[in-house]
Image (cartoon, coloured by chain):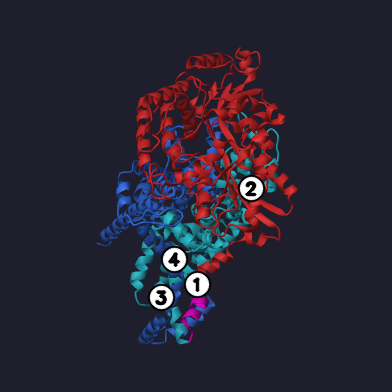
Amino acid sequence: MTTAVPVKPRRTWTPSQIVLTLLGTAVSAVFLAPLLWGLFTSLKSETEAVDVPTHWLPRHWTGQAWKALFDTGNITNWFVNSLVVSVCVTSIVLLVSALAGYGFARTEFRGKGALMGLVMSGLMVSPAVLGVPLFTTVQQMGMVDTYWGMILPQCAPAAMVYILYKFFQGIPRELEEAAFIDGAGRWRVFFTIVLPLSRPSLAAVGIFTFIASWNNFLWPYMVTNNPDLMTMPNGIATVMNSYGIQWAQLMAGGLMAGLPLIIVFVFFQRQIVAGVAHTGLAGQ
Amino acid sequence: MTTAETVLAPARARTAAASATLRRRQGFQHGGWFVAPFLALFALFVVWPLLRGVYLSLTDANITGAGANFIGLDNYREALKDPLMWDALGHSAYFTLLVVPCITVLAFLLAMLAHHIERGKWLWRLCFFAPFLLPSTVAGNLWQWLFNPGTGMINYVFGGDTPWLTDKSYAMLAIVIETLWWTVGFSFLLYLAALQSIPAHLYEAAKLDGANAWHRMVHITLPMLRNITGLVIALQILASLQVFDQAVVMMDFGPGPESSTRTFVQYTLEEGFTSYRVGYASAISIIFFVIIAAVALARMWLLRNRTEEATR
Amino acid sequence: MAGSFGFAALGSGADALASTARTRVRYWNLFSGGDGSNMIAMLDAFRKAHPDIAVKDSTLQWGNPFYTKLAMAAAGNRAPDLGVMHIGRVAGFAPGRLLDAWDTGLLAKYGLRESDYNPKLWQRGVVDGKLYALPLDVHVQLCFYRKDVLRKAGLLGADDRIVPVTSVDDWFGVLKEARKATKKGLQTIGLWINDQNFQWWFFVAFYTQLGGTWFDDAKTEVTFDTDKATQVLEFLRRHVTDGYANPAMGSVNAEQFINGAPFAWEGNWSVPVYSGAKLEYGAIPLPPVFGTRATHAESHSFVLPHQSDRGGATDEAAHQLAAYVVTHAQQWAAGGHIPAYLPTLSTPAYQKLSPQNEYVSAMNHQANEPKVWFAGSTGILAQRVGPIVVSSTVGSAKPDAAAGRMKKELATLLAMKNPMDGKTAAQGGTAA
């Protein structure tokens, strides 16, 4: 990112560039075709969708499936639930993992090494691995079928603490020490000096957490049973997806759940790419 | 930035000894509080469930949470003899075996492609990465539809009437194909970032030495991507072993044709929430945890050996 | 910890906010497609008749996801006020723990009595002397046939119904003729060869036709007859080997039937689908190819998922709603199910329904799963044994080997303890 381009190199259509671009176009077409098929299905009538032999473009374009989606389904509920859960999870994760990352990187307290080791071993625990005991724990707390039951268990990601811990370790100590000597306390230093410096890392963690939470299926699936409280991925999979599936509607619902992130991606591509790559690469 | 610079200047004037004591004192006062909120959540939702899982695995607890009896290691004994558990483990392992090499190679090739096309970089990135942004269930439903015999795109485009989702020789393959499409974007981005961070002067020097494109790739690109490849493989192994979402969605929450796609996670949830055997489900979860931990530790061990090698 | 309880209260979300002065009944069901719209129509009628009761209905995915959700909600003490279950699942669903018993006095107050039921059916919902499941219907596996295709093949009798079939040879003779009249690209019969539930149901039907049994009365011995089972498995398999069922079309039987395939074996819930598609078709119980008549039957029933504070106006409204739906099930019957409420059965309006009048007799020739805690629609029994039937039908296991495996699996299940009370089937408990 830092290597700014001083002179734009002249781009020419060399034969190898032509071949590569054609290849890229072909591969992209393969990647987009499933999405397009889904989109076209959502614009067919339910009977045309299951017509044999099938075909790409609707013979009769209709928004019937999309309309039905909003008329009959709980889709707007789910959308709001998804938004509430993802925003809460992202905020809480950012806050607690920034604090913890900083605590581990820059402060001393008894048992720090052991606690750090414990947190790192937490990298191996996920709802997929320990779903059943996690559910019974949340059940004991009376949080089954609540927002908090969906949110809080997603808020202890050891990986994010580790990423921010690594980052905070890289901030020169002198910056903070100067502030201490000027009389600033730990907390002020953290909020006024350290946090502003770590904006890119925080953005990376935030973006990654938001995507993961928006798309999370397994945990919300386990902990919510009430269809009014479900998030998009969960509602689509367990409520809409029943015997006698209405494919046009299902495709429309899927696009509803998937499009927001894709649109956001188009606009914030650089940040998201940096965010995903950053969080991913931190595992090295 | 301005704040940082203004505080930085006077700092240099102070003695290191003074700041060291100060740091220690400050740290002792507040360090615990910084990590406390996270540790509280961590204790409640990671450590406690793990301990609870160990405890439950020694009981015959059911889903209602009432009337559990301590039964020692009976659950573990049963698990080791349970053919369904071994089948499920086999399915997850088989899935991993298929997905990991494919995704690694595919991600690398896509990254090379996107890296070397000069025009429209954002477009390639978007196309290859977009599927990853879909929720797992949406991707699963979409491919369930694509694989549908008669009305799906796959058989329409490639001809034939392959029973992708209803024949045990294709079902897992269908899930693997869906997974490649859906998740390759993540590894692709990692590779792309790694490619972009290879210093250009290496290539220029090699060019001056007369190395052709192939040599440059073998002697510069591939060695420089060694670490990232290790990371991609490790992340994929851990994620693939825990496969659940797409498999159940594509199979309508069933175990697939002749139970050929029931994954390990699916089996633990079925035992716990469908058969209501929370104790037994906990026991096989703990077994699974040990397997995952072993894989993760093996990777750390490999990594340590390699860095030692490098520093030697 | 205390804090989390506070959070829990906060988090009950939209539910708590939406409550009004009216009594609110939360009702979960597993009905989609034609069943779904019929159920909603009955609910709407109820809402109109009882504006003081707000019914909040939620449809979840049929099968295990539904039972999982219902059990987890009941276990987490966030159960709905009213739910639907297959009656065969009730024994394993921990009556008393995950389910609350019906107040028959309250039901009577709203016009529903034991005497309105076939006594056998009523008894299937009773556990330890208390009623836990209130049957709404009996639903059966049927042989759907296209009259237009069969007429061409000369397989319709004078009454415009399919010619009688009483033996395996009869049946394959019919298929042979029907295939000649079938359009290219379509299979002759759809019988869900890859679906462990359907294959299991069909197995139960034909195994019962052969007079096969499962366990002895004490539930200590497996009395499963592998010879009879092999016979059934070979029969099912032959549809594939003789080319009548196309393995590639295993999951799209309904589409194939609508497009012109002559036969489809399906549950009676497909009636609204095929009627809606304006097909000329009929439906009979699965043909008695082994001599006696029997077809697989289950029942949808209303249940009260366990709530620690069940009672009061909400509970009464749940009783009222259930009683209303059971006694006003004409539309439900039109949707293909055989109504459990006897007065409905004897109305002229019901007797005029077609193809219902062709298969209503199936009610008296039911092939049920054994009454044990692990049985019932999509229960553990179906989950464990169903895939074995499929493996034989699709040809990856020999029928006799599969029959042996089925017997072994049944023995395993019989020795297994019900996680709810720690008792095996022989030790009885809730399964009695």
C153, A25: nearer the viewer: C153
In this structure image, what is the colour of chain C? red
Disc 4 marks a residue whose amino acid type is Leu
> Horizontal and vertical percent for residue C159?
66, 16
Residue at image x 60%, y 56%? A267
Task: Please say whether residue C53 is visible from this viewpoint.
Answer: yes
| Residue density around tag 3, few if under 14, some if 14–19, many if 20 or more, within 10 Å | some
- Between the residue at mark 1 and the residue at mark 2, the CA separation in whole angstroms equals 68 Å
Question: Magenta span: helix, strand or loop, mainly?
Answer: helix
What residue sits right under mark 4 in the picture? B44
Q: Which residues are magenta?
A: A183-195
Magenta residue check for B59: no
Chain letter corresponding to the colour cyan: A
Q: For the residues labelled 4 and 1, say whether their Cβ atoms are less than 8 Å apart.
A: no
In this structure image, what is the colour of chain B? blue
| Residue B251 falls left or right of residue C148 | left
What residue sits right under mark 1 in the picture? A197
Chain of the residue under the numbered disc 3 shown in the image: A
Magenta residue check for A186: yes
Chain of the residue under the numbered disc 1 shown in the image: A
Q: For the residues labelled 2 and 4, say whether their Cβ atoms are less than 8 Å apart.
A: no
What residue sits right under mark 2 in the picture? C107
| Residue density around tag 1, few if under 14, some if 14–19, many if 20 or more, within 10 Å | some
Instruction: Please identify, in this view, whether the residue under mark 2 or under mark 3 is nearer the observer.
Output: 2
What residue sits right under mark 3 in the picture? A106
